[in-house]
C-alpha cells in the first residue's frame, strides 16, 4: 500500500478546503502563477496519485520537489492543513516507489550521515572552488567559506565555570561546522560566560534535515537515534542553526506513536533550544551592559525554520534591540524565504534567484549596514546574493554581535 493511503495520511489529503490562503504566501507559486506550483494544487495532485488517477510522472516529481518547505502555507491555512508535511509525505512516496536519483541518493545516504565522508567532500570543494566559475546555477560558489579545519576536528574543551548552572550540549550542524567555525567558537564562548558547562560531542551526526525533506526518513531516523545517545547526559541541547533546531525538535514524528523510540526521542526534543531562545527565555540574559560588536544600522532576516518551524521571532529581536552601539531597523518581508532551502537552489536555480533578489531588494530598503540571521544556510545564500548584486552589506550570525571582544 502506498504511504499516501497509510493510517490517517489519506484523511489529511481531504482536509484542504481549497480556499487559496496558502497560495497567497507561496514564493514558488508567485514565480509561476500556475496552480500546480502552489500548495493547493500540489495537494490535489498528491490526492490524484493516491486515488490512482495520476501517474508519478517526471513532471509530477518536479512539481512536488519544487516546494521550499518554508512552512508559510501551513501557517496561513485557516483549517490548519500542514501543507509542507503533505508535500514531505508525497516525497516519501516517491522515494519508496521510484527511489532517488544518484545526485541525491549518494549525498543523503552516504555523505551526510558519515562524518569522514562529509569532511572529505567539504575539503574537496574548498580545494576545487578556485578553478570553477563564480556562479553555478545562480549559486555564488566563490562566496562560500569552507574552513581548512572544521570546528569539530579542531575543538578543544575550555575550562568550565565554577558551579555551572546547566550542562549544555552544543549541536553544531554540518554547515556551521564546515563553514562558520568562528561562530561555533563564539557560541561556546557566550554560553560559558553565562555560566554554562558546554559539552561538544565530536561524534555528532548531521541532524537529518536534507534526507527528511527529500523523503528519505530512514536516514533521518538513524541520525536521530545516534544523536539521542550522544546527548543523553546533558540538561539542554543548544544549536545556532535554525534548520537543525527545527529537525531536532521534530524527531518524534519520525517514529510510531506507541513505540519506545518515540518516547525517548520526544524527551530529547524537549531539551532542544535555539541559541536565541535559550539566552532570552531560559537564561534571561541581561543586555544592560552588553555592547554590540557592530557600529551602524542592523537588520534581521527570519529563517523559515525558526520563525515558522519553531515560532521564534521575538527572541532574536530582543537581543538586537537590547545591545548598545548599533541601530536596529526592521526589514520589510523579514520572514520571507531567502531562496536557499537546501538543494532547492541547485535544482530550481531560476526560482531561487528570483526569490533571493526580492530579499536583496528588501534589504536595500532598510539602508542597513549589516544583515543578521541565525541560520548558516540563509547566511550563505544572502551573502552570495548580496555579492552578486554588488551590495555593500555584511552578513553576520546573531551570536557574533554578542561575542564582542
Image (tube, helix red, strand yellow):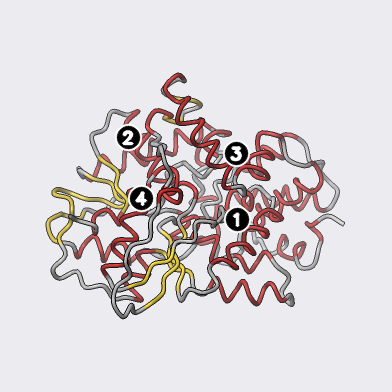
How busy is the neighbourhood of tag 3: few (under 14 within 10 Å), some, or many (20 plus)? Answer: few
Mark 1 to mark 4: distance in Å?
A: 20 Å
Asked if labels 2 and 4 touch by Cβ distance under 8 angstroms, the answer is no
Residue under the point 40% across and 40% down: 380
Q: Label 3: which residue?
A: 34
Residue 336 visible, this orientation:
no
Badge 2 element: helix
**Nearer the N terminus, badge 3 or badge 2?**
3
Asked if labels 1 and 2 touch by Cβ distance under 8 angstroms, the answer is no
* Occupied quadrant, residue 193: bottom left
User: Where is residue 261 shown, x and y percent of the image?
Assistant: 69, 72
User: Looking at the image, is mark 2 or mark 1 nearer the viewer?
Assistant: 2
Q: Label 2: which residue?
A: 386
Residue under the point 65% across and 52% down: 87
Badge 4 element: loop
User: Looking at the image, is mark 3 or mark 2 nearer the viewer?
Assistant: 2
Q: Label 4: which residue?
A: 333
Mark 4 to mark 2: distance in Å?
A: 16 Å
Disc on res. 331: none
* Left or right, 46 with reference to 306: right
Badge 3 element: loop
**Nearer the N terminus, badge 4 or badge 3?**
3
Mark 2 to mark 1: distance in Å?
A: 28 Å
Asked if labels 3 and 4 touch by Cβ distance under 8 angstroms, the answer is no
Q: Is residue 231 above or below residue 74?
A: below
Mark 4 to mark 3: distance in Å?
A: 23 Å
Disc on res. 84: 1
Amino acid at each position: 500500500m502506498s504511504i499516501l493511503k497509510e493510517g490517517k495520511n489519506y484523511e489529511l489529503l481531504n482536509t484542504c478546503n481549497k480556499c487559496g490562503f496558502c497560495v497567497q504566501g507561496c514564493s514558488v507559486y508567485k514565480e509561476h502563477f500556475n496552480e500546480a506550483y502552489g500548495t493547493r494544487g500540489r495537494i490535489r495532485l498528491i490526492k490524484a496519485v493516491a486515488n490512482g488517477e495520476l501517474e508519478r510522472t517526471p513532471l509530477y516529481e518536479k512539481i512536488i520537489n519544487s516546494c521550499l518547505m518554508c512552512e508559510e502555507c501551513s501557517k496561513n491555512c485557516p483549517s490548519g492543513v500542514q501543507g509542507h508535511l503533505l508535500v514531505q509525505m508525497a516525497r516519501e512516496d516517491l522515494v519508496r516507489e521510484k527511489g532517488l536519483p544518484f545526485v541525491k541518493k549518494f549525498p543523503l545516504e552516504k555523505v551526510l550521515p558519515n562524518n569522514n565522508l562529509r569532511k572529505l567532500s567539504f575539503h574537496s570543494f574548498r580545494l576545487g572552488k578556485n578553478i570553477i566559475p563564480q556562479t553555478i546555477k545562480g549559486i555564488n560558489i566563490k562566496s562560500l567559506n569552507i574552513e581548512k579545519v572544521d570546528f569539530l576536528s579542531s575543538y578543544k574543551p575550555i575550562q568550565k565555570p565554577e558551579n555551572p548552572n546547566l550542562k549544555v550540549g552544543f549541536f553544531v550542524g554540518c554547515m556551521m561546522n564546515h563553514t562558520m567555525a568562528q561562530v561555533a567558537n563564539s557560541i561556546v564562548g557566550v554560553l560559558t560566560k553565562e555560566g554554562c558547562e558546554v559539552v561538544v560531542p565530536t561524534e555528532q551526526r548531521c541532524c537529518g534535515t536534507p534526507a527528511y525533506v527529500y523523503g528519505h526518513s530512514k536516514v533521518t531516523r538513524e541520525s536521530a537515534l545516534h544523536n539521542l545517545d550522544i546527548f543523553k547526559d546533558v540538561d539542554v541541547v543548544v544549536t545556532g542553526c535554525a534548520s537543525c533546531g527545527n529537525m531536532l525538535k521534530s524527531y518524534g514524528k519520525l517514529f510510531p506513536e506507541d513505540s519506545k523510540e518515540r518516547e525517548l526521542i520526544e524527551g530529547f526534543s524537549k531539551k532542544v533550544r535555539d541559541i536565541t531562545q535559550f539566552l532570552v527565555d531560559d537564561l534571561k540574559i541581561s543586555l544592560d551592559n552588553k555592547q554590540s560588536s557592530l557600529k551602524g544600522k542592523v537588520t534581521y532576516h527570519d529563517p523559515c525554520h525558526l520563525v515558522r518551524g519553531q515560532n521564534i521571532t521575538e527572541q532574536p529581536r530582543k537581543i538586537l534591540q537590547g545591545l548598545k552601539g548599533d541601530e536596529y531597523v526592521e526589514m520589510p518581508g523579514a520572514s520571507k524565504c531567502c531562496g536557499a532551502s537546501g538543494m532547492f537552489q541547485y535544482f530550481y536555480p531560476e526560482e531561487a534567484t528570483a526569490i533571493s533578489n526580492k530579499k536583496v531588494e528588501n534589504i536595500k530598503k532598510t539602508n542597513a549596514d549589516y544583515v543578521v540571521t541565525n541560520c548558516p544556510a540563509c547566511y550563505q545564500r544572502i551573502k552570495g546574493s548580496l555579492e552578486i548584486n554588488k551590495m555593500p552589506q555584511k552578513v553576520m550570525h546573531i551570536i557574533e554581535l554578542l561575542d564582542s571582544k
